Image (cartoon, helix red, strand yellow):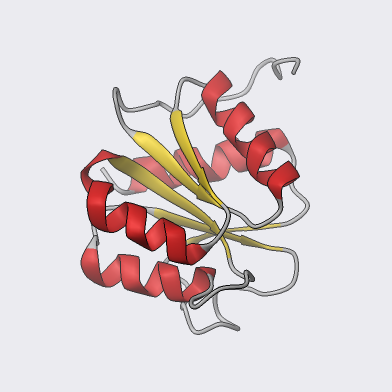
Amino acid sequence: MTPIPNRASPSAPLGQMVLIVEDDPLIRDLLCEILESEGFVTQGMANADRALEFLIDQSSRVCLLLTDINMHGTINGAELAKTSILLWPAIPIVVMSGVETPETVGLGQNLAFIRKPFTVEKILKVIQKALVSDE
């Protein structure tokens, strides 16, 4: 992947990871690749159920939760975000969707949101803003 010149890169907290929850393996792998090229450690999960289990065990390692809204499973990305807000309020959350918005799934406006499809530059800006506003 060719780096995009003249853009602000998110600051990757040392040893911290971005938990990426996306049911489409191509998008999930691409997001992992993009963020790893920026210095992040990533952990990709195919559904919100597995992501919740991961957070229960390893939330202290997670610096950001990046989740799709619409996914199959016992819980979806919106429910994962709601649970994360309650259990781990210090972890910033970015939700993404090509269909829904945080408001339409009852998340309110206090979360970072990015509409699919998005550019590399746009996702990096949204992540940077979420990390900075959480400091």
Q: What is the count of numbered marks?
A: 0
The foreground one among 70 and 50 is: 50
Determine whether 129 is above or below 97 in the image: above
Quadrant of the rendered image containing residue 132: top left
Q: Is residue 114 left or right of residue 126?
A: right
- In the image, residue 33 lies at what x, y percent? 62, 28
Determine whether 96 is above or below 13 in the image: below
Q: Is residue 105 left or right of residue 121?
A: left
- In the image, residue 117 lies at what x, y percent? 78, 52
- In the image, residue 115 lies at what x, y percent? 70, 59
Residue at 32 percent across and 27 percent down: it is 13
Q: Is residue 64 left or right of residue 91?
A: right
Quadrant of the rendered image containing residue 69: bottom right
- In the image, residue 31 lies at what x, y percent? 63, 38
Residue at 43 percent across and 69 percent down: it is 80
The foreground one among 89 and 26 is: 26
Quadrant of the rendered image containing residue 116: bottom right
Determine whether 123 is above or below 114 in the image: above
Quarter holding the N terminus is top right
Residue at 65 percent across and 57 percent down: it is 23
Quarter holding the C terminus is top left
